Image: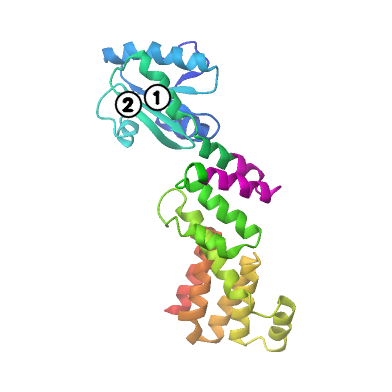
Amino acid sequence: MAGDNPWVFDVNEAEFDAKVMQKSHEVPVIVDFWAPWCAPCRALAPILGRLVEEQAGTVLLAKVNTDDNQELALQFGVNGIPHVVGIRKGRAVVQFTGLIHESQLPEFLQKLQPSAAEMEAEAAAQIEKTNPTDAEAKYRAALKNNPQQEDAIVGLARVLIDLNNDKESAEVLEQIGSAGEFGAEADKLRAILWLREKAKDLPNEEVLRKKTAANSNDANVLCDLGTLLAANGKNAEGLECLFQAGRFDRKLVATRVKETMVKIFFVIGVRSEMADAYRDKLTSLLY
Protein backbone atom coordinates (compact mmCIF):
# COMPACT_ATOMS: atom_id res chain seq x y z
CA MET A 1 0.00 0.00 0.00
CA ALA A 2 1.07 3.58 -0.60
CA GLY A 3 0.85 4.67 3.05
CA ASP A 4 0.57 8.26 4.31
CA ASN A 5 2.98 9.96 1.92
CA PRO A 6 0.81 12.46 -0.05
CA TRP A 7 2.93 12.01 -3.17
CA VAL A 8 2.69 8.20 -3.21
CA PHE A 9 -0.48 6.43 -4.33
CA ASP A 10 -1.79 3.06 -5.49
CA VAL A 11 -3.13 2.88 -9.02
CA ASN A 12 -4.95 0.21 -11.05
CA GLU A 13 -5.49 -0.31 -14.77
CA ALA A 14 -8.70 1.72 -14.90
CA GLU A 15 -7.08 4.75 -13.25
CA PHE A 16 -3.67 4.52 -14.86
CA ASP A 17 -4.21 6.81 -17.82
CA ALA A 18 -5.65 9.67 -15.78
CA LYS A 19 -3.50 9.34 -12.66
CA VAL A 20 -0.19 8.52 -14.37
CA MET A 21 -0.04 9.16 -18.11
CA GLN A 22 -2.05 12.38 -18.09
CA LYS A 23 -0.59 13.57 -14.80
CA SER A 24 2.93 13.06 -16.16
CA HIS A 25 2.33 16.03 -18.47
CA GLU A 26 2.27 18.17 -15.32
CA VAL A 27 4.87 16.42 -13.15
CA PRO A 28 7.10 13.34 -13.66
CA VAL A 29 5.66 10.11 -12.27
CA ILE A 30 7.66 7.10 -11.06
CA VAL A 31 5.76 3.84 -11.46
CA ASP A 32 6.72 1.00 -9.10
CA PHE A 33 5.55 -2.42 -10.31
CA TRP A 34 5.54 -4.67 -7.24
CA ALA A 35 3.75 -7.62 -5.59
CA PRO A 36 3.02 -8.42 -1.92
CA TRP A 37 5.04 -11.66 -2.00
CA CYS A 38 8.16 -9.94 -3.45
CA ALA A 39 10.80 -9.35 -0.74
CA PRO A 40 12.99 -7.02 -2.91
CA CYS A 41 9.83 -5.00 -3.64
CA ARG A 42 9.21 -4.55 0.06
CA ALA A 43 12.83 -3.47 0.55
CA LEU A 44 12.73 -0.94 -2.32
CA ALA A 45 9.37 0.60 -1.42
CA PRO A 46 10.49 2.73 1.57
CA ILE A 47 13.58 3.88 -0.34
CA LEU A 48 11.46 5.12 -3.23
CA GLY A 49 9.04 6.66 -0.77
CA ARG A 50 11.80 8.67 0.92
CA LEU A 51 13.17 9.78 -2.43
CA VAL A 52 9.78 11.07 -3.56
CA GLU A 53 9.06 12.69 -0.19
CA GLU A 54 12.33 14.61 -0.45
CA GLN A 55 11.19 16.04 -3.79
CA ALA A 56 8.13 17.59 -2.09
CA GLY A 57 5.67 17.14 -4.94
CA THR A 58 7.98 17.73 -7.89
CA VAL A 59 7.77 14.01 -8.66
CA LEU A 60 5.08 11.44 -7.82
CA LEU A 61 5.21 7.70 -7.11
CA ALA A 62 2.48 5.39 -8.45
CA LYS A 63 2.36 1.85 -7.02
CA VAL A 64 1.08 -0.94 -9.32
CA ASN A 65 0.38 -4.36 -7.79
CA THR A 66 1.25 -6.72 -10.66
CA ASP A 67 -0.88 -9.53 -9.20
CA ASP A 68 -3.97 -7.37 -9.61
CA ASN A 69 -2.93 -5.54 -12.79
CA GLN A 70 -1.34 -8.12 -15.04
CA GLU A 71 -2.37 -6.44 -18.32
CA LEU A 72 -0.71 -3.22 -17.24
CA ALA A 73 2.47 -5.08 -16.33
CA LEU A 74 2.40 -6.78 -19.72
CA GLN A 75 1.94 -3.44 -21.45
CA PHE A 76 5.14 -2.15 -19.84
CA GLY A 77 7.09 -5.32 -20.56
CA VAL A 78 7.56 -6.21 -16.91
CA ASN A 79 9.57 -9.44 -16.78
CA GLY A 80 10.73 -9.16 -13.20
CA ILE A 81 9.91 -7.16 -10.10
CA PRO A 82 10.45 -4.72 -8.66
CA HIS A 83 10.33 -2.91 -11.99
CA VAL A 84 10.47 0.88 -11.83
CA VAL A 85 9.61 3.19 -14.72
CA GLY A 86 9.97 6.97 -14.84
CA ILE A 87 7.31 8.65 -17.00
CA ARG A 88 7.39 12.23 -18.24
CA LYS A 89 5.05 13.86 -20.76
CA GLY A 90 3.30 10.55 -21.30
CA ARG A 91 6.52 8.70 -22.18
CA ALA A 92 8.70 6.22 -20.32
CA VAL A 93 12.12 7.88 -20.21
CA VAL A 94 14.07 5.78 -17.70
CA GLN A 95 13.62 2.41 -15.93
CA PHE A 96 15.31 -0.33 -13.96
CA THR A 97 14.50 -3.83 -12.71
CA GLY A 98 15.50 -5.30 -9.37
CA LEU A 99 16.64 -3.91 -6.05
CA ILE A 100 19.28 -1.22 -6.58
CA HIS A 101 21.30 0.65 -3.97
CA GLU A 102 19.83 3.87 -2.63
CA SER A 103 22.93 5.73 -3.84
CA GLN A 104 21.90 4.99 -7.46
CA LEU A 105 18.48 6.59 -7.19
CA PRO A 106 19.57 10.26 -7.54
CA GLU A 107 20.97 9.41 -10.97
CA PHE A 108 17.65 7.76 -11.88
CA LEU A 109 15.79 10.86 -10.71
CA GLN A 110 18.11 13.14 -12.67
CA LYS A 111 17.39 11.22 -15.87
CA LEU A 112 13.69 11.68 -15.21
CA GLN A 113 14.02 15.45 -15.22
CA PRO A 114 13.71 17.35 -18.52
CA SER A 115 16.93 18.17 -20.33
CA ALA A 116 17.94 21.73 -21.18
CA ALA A 117 16.68 21.19 -24.73
CA GLU A 118 13.33 19.90 -23.46
CA MET A 119 12.92 22.86 -21.10
CA GLU A 120 13.67 25.31 -23.93
CA ALA A 121 11.14 23.56 -26.18
CA GLU A 122 8.49 23.57 -23.46
CA ALA A 123 9.06 27.28 -22.79
CA ALA A 124 8.84 28.01 -26.50
CA ALA A 125 5.55 26.14 -26.85
CA GLN A 126 3.98 28.27 -24.13
CA ILE A 127 4.64 31.54 -26.00
CA GLU A 128 4.17 30.46 -29.63
CA LYS A 129 0.91 32.34 -30.13
CA THR A 130 1.77 35.43 -28.10
CA ASN A 131 5.41 35.90 -29.07
CA PRO A 132 6.40 33.77 -32.07
CA THR A 133 9.72 35.56 -32.53
CA ASP A 134 10.88 34.69 -29.02
CA ALA A 135 9.46 31.19 -29.44
CA GLU A 136 11.56 30.77 -32.58
CA ALA A 137 14.69 31.76 -30.64
CA LYS A 138 13.90 29.27 -27.88
CA TYR A 139 13.27 26.45 -30.33
CA ARG A 140 16.58 27.21 -32.02
CA ALA A 141 18.31 27.16 -28.62
CA ALA A 142 16.73 23.79 -27.87
CA LEU A 143 17.97 22.37 -31.16
CA LYS A 144 21.43 23.74 -30.51
CA ASN A 145 21.46 21.71 -27.29
CA ASN A 146 19.94 18.66 -28.98
CA PRO A 147 19.51 18.63 -32.78
CA GLN A 148 17.25 15.54 -32.47
CA GLN A 149 14.76 17.17 -30.08
CA GLU A 150 11.61 16.33 -32.07
CA ASP A 151 9.17 18.61 -30.27
CA ALA A 152 11.57 21.47 -30.97
CA ILE A 153 11.82 20.48 -34.64
CA VAL A 154 8.07 20.53 -35.20
CA GLY A 155 7.70 23.58 -32.95
CA LEU A 156 10.24 25.55 -34.95
CA ALA A 157 8.59 24.48 -38.21
CA ARG A 158 5.20 25.55 -36.85
CA VAL A 159 6.48 28.98 -35.79
CA LEU A 160 8.24 29.51 -39.12
CA ILE A 161 4.93 28.85 -40.88
CA ASP A 162 3.26 31.46 -38.66
CA LEU A 163 6.06 33.87 -39.58
CA ASN A 164 5.56 33.06 -43.30
CA ASN A 165 8.98 31.48 -43.63
CA ASP A 166 7.69 28.46 -45.50
CA LYS A 167 10.99 27.61 -47.22
CA GLU A 168 12.93 27.12 -43.99
CA SER A 169 9.97 25.40 -42.36
CA ALA A 170 10.02 22.77 -45.13
CA GLU A 171 13.77 22.32 -44.64
CA VAL A 172 13.35 21.86 -40.89
CA LEU A 173 10.64 19.24 -41.42
CA GLU A 174 13.01 17.16 -43.53
CA GLN A 175 14.60 16.10 -40.22
CA ILE A 176 11.50 14.23 -39.05
CA GLY A 177 9.41 11.48 -40.60
CA SER A 178 5.78 10.43 -40.32
CA ALA A 179 6.29 7.87 -37.56
CA GLY A 180 6.66 8.37 -33.83
CA GLU A 181 5.11 10.76 -31.35
CA PHE A 182 5.47 13.86 -33.53
CA GLY A 183 4.95 12.27 -36.94
CA ALA A 184 1.30 13.29 -37.24
CA GLU A 185 2.12 16.90 -36.38
CA ALA A 186 4.95 16.91 -38.91
CA ASP A 187 2.60 15.54 -41.59
CA LYS A 188 0.05 18.23 -40.73
CA LEU A 189 2.65 20.96 -41.15
CA ARG A 190 3.87 19.48 -44.44
CA ALA A 191 0.27 19.46 -45.67
CA ILE A 192 -0.18 23.11 -44.68
CA LEU A 193 2.96 24.01 -46.61
CA TRP A 194 1.73 22.02 -49.63
CA LEU A 195 -1.60 23.84 -49.64
CA ARG A 196 0.07 27.23 -49.30
CA GLU A 197 2.41 26.44 -52.15
CA LYS A 198 -0.49 25.38 -54.39
CA ALA A 199 -2.48 28.49 -53.47
CA LYS A 200 0.23 31.13 -53.77
CA ASP A 201 -0.31 31.85 -57.48
CA LEU A 202 -4.10 31.60 -57.43
CA PRO A 203 -6.38 34.65 -57.69
CA ASN A 204 -7.66 35.97 -54.39
CA GLU A 205 -10.78 34.63 -52.72
CA GLU A 206 -13.05 37.46 -53.93
CA VAL A 207 -12.09 36.86 -57.56
CA LEU A 208 -12.63 33.11 -57.31
CA ARG A 209 -15.98 33.53 -55.60
CA LYS A 210 -17.12 35.85 -58.39
CA LYS A 211 -16.07 33.24 -60.94
CA THR A 212 -18.00 30.49 -59.19
CA ALA A 213 -21.03 32.78 -58.89
CA ALA A 214 -20.89 33.36 -62.64
CA ASN A 215 -20.49 29.63 -63.40
CA SER A 216 -21.15 27.34 -60.46
CA ASN A 217 -20.34 24.25 -62.55
CA ASP A 218 -16.76 25.23 -63.35
CA ALA A 219 -14.88 22.38 -61.68
CA ASN A 220 -11.42 23.89 -62.12
CA VAL A 221 -12.45 27.15 -60.48
CA LEU A 222 -14.07 25.20 -57.65
CA CYS A 223 -10.80 23.30 -57.20
CA ASP A 224 -8.90 26.57 -57.07
CA LEU A 225 -11.33 28.03 -54.54
CA GLY A 226 -11.24 24.88 -52.41
CA THR A 227 -7.45 24.91 -52.38
CA LEU A 228 -7.27 28.61 -51.51
CA LEU A 229 -9.85 28.29 -48.74
CA ALA A 230 -7.98 25.36 -47.18
CA ALA A 231 -4.68 27.23 -47.43
CA ASN A 232 -6.36 30.05 -45.48
CA GLY A 233 -7.63 27.66 -42.81
CA LYS A 234 -11.22 27.39 -44.06
CA ASN A 235 -11.05 23.63 -44.29
CA ALA A 236 -14.73 22.68 -44.17
CA GLU A 237 -15.68 25.04 -46.98
CA GLY A 238 -12.59 24.06 -48.92
CA LEU A 239 -13.50 20.38 -48.75
CA GLU A 240 -17.03 21.06 -49.91
CA CYS A 241 -15.78 23.05 -52.91
CA LEU A 242 -13.45 20.21 -53.86
CA PHE A 243 -16.23 17.66 -53.50
CA GLN A 244 -18.52 19.70 -55.72
CA ALA A 245 -15.70 20.06 -58.25
CA GLY A 246 -15.43 16.27 -58.33
CA ARG A 247 -19.16 15.93 -58.88
CA PHE A 248 -19.02 18.24 -61.91
CA ASP A 249 -15.89 16.74 -63.45
CA ARG A 250 -15.08 13.11 -62.60
CA LYS A 251 -11.76 13.38 -64.46
CA LEU A 252 -10.48 15.69 -61.71
CA VAL A 253 -11.42 13.34 -58.88
CA ALA A 254 -8.41 11.02 -59.07
CA THR A 255 -5.99 13.93 -59.51
CA ARG A 256 -6.53 17.43 -58.12
CA VAL A 257 -9.57 16.69 -55.99
CA LYS A 258 -8.19 13.60 -54.29
CA GLU A 259 -4.70 14.99 -53.78
CA THR A 260 -5.92 18.22 -52.24
CA MET A 261 -8.58 16.61 -50.05
CA VAL A 262 -6.04 14.15 -48.67
CA LYS A 263 -3.75 17.04 -47.71
CA ILE A 264 -6.64 18.70 -45.90
CA PHE A 265 -7.31 15.44 -44.05
CA PHE A 266 -3.77 15.65 -42.65
CA VAL A 267 -4.41 19.22 -41.51
CA ILE A 268 -7.71 18.52 -39.75
CA GLY A 269 -6.71 15.06 -38.47
CA VAL A 270 -6.91 11.97 -40.64
CA ARG A 271 -9.36 10.29 -38.24
CA SER A 272 -11.37 13.39 -37.39
CA GLU A 273 -15.14 13.37 -37.92
CA MET A 274 -14.85 15.82 -40.81
CA ALA A 275 -12.11 13.82 -42.51
CA ASP A 276 -14.11 10.61 -42.17
CA ALA A 277 -17.19 12.25 -43.68
CA TYR A 278 -15.36 13.67 -46.66
CA ARG A 279 -13.31 10.52 -47.13
CA ASP A 280 -16.63 8.72 -47.66
CA LYS A 281 -17.72 11.41 -50.11
CA LEU A 282 -14.43 11.13 -51.98
CA THR A 283 -14.83 7.36 -52.15
CA SER A 284 -18.30 7.78 -53.65
CA LEU A 285 -16.76 9.86 -56.43
CA LEU A 286 -13.89 7.48 -57.06
CA TYR A 287 -15.92 4.30 -57.18
| Element carrying mark 2 | strand
Which residue: 62% across, 68% down? Answer: 231
Magenta run includes residue 127 = yes
- Under mark 2, the amino acid is Phe
Residue 95: give x, y in percent of width and height: 35, 29
Q: Residues within 10 Å of mark 1 (few under 14, many from 20)?
A: some
**Secondary structure that dominates the magenta span:** helix
Q: Using the image as rendered, state which of residue 218 and residue 126 is in the foreground.
A: 126
- Under mark 1, the amino acid is Phe
Image marks 2 and 1: residues in contact by CB distance under 8 Å: yes
Magenta run includes residue 268 = no
Quadrant in which residue 120 is drawn: top right
Residue 108: give x, y in percent of width and height: 40, 24
Task: Establish if 149 lies above or below 16.
Answer: below
Q: Which mark is residue 257?
A: none
Q: Which mark is residue 96?
A: 2
Q: Which mark is residue 108?
A: 1
Residue 225: give x, y in percent of width and height: 64, 77
Task: Establish if 101 lies above or below 28.
Answer: above
Distance (Cα) linking label 2 and label 1: 9 Å
**Magenta stretch, residue numbers:** 123-143
